[in-house]
Amino acid sequence: MPNYTVTVNLNPELKPSLVWDGCDLPFKDKTFPNVVSIGMIHQITDKTRFVSELKRVASERVVIYDAVSKTLEVIDV
């Protein structure tokens, strides 16, 4: 099963902004200064690939928060 990343709006009438495979993001290298993952890393089967992909599209920092283990990781790229 692929891993998906979804941006979700609290308003149920709005549709998600983007849906994609979190291990194969459709962005160029260093597209964003900061990349944030909240509450989903525990659902990812290939965590190493997922984190590598987040680092690839970030130019400064990756922030990963896992609500299940209540861990926060900040990675300077």
Image (cartoon, helix red, strand yellow):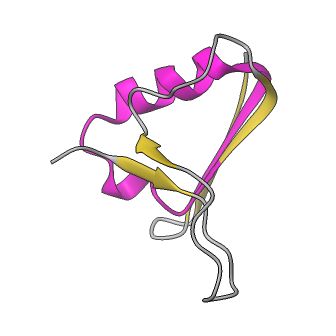
Q: Measuring 60% from the left and 22% from the top, which residue is drawn there?
A: 27
In the rendered image of this protein, does residue 62 appear above or below residue 66? above
Q: Split into 4 quadrants, where in the image is the C terminus? A: top right
Q: In which quarter of the image is residue 23?
A: top left
**Is 59 one of the magenta-colored residues?**
yes
Q: Please indicate whether residue 52 sits to the left or right of residue 2 in the image.
A: right
Q: Measuring 27% from the left and 34% from the top, which residue is drawn there?
A: 46
Q: Residue 64, image x and y in percent?
A: 62, 46
Q: Please indicate whether residue 47 sits to the left or right of residue 13 in the image.
A: left
Q: Residue 48, image x and y in percent?
A: 37, 26
Q: Which residue lies furthest to the left in this view?
A: 1
Q: Residue 65, image x and y in percent?
A: 61, 55
In the rendered image of this protein, does residue 67 appear above or below residue 76? below
**Is 45 one of the magenta-colored residues?**
yes
- Give the magenta range: 37-65
| Residue placed most toward the observer, 15 or 40 | 15
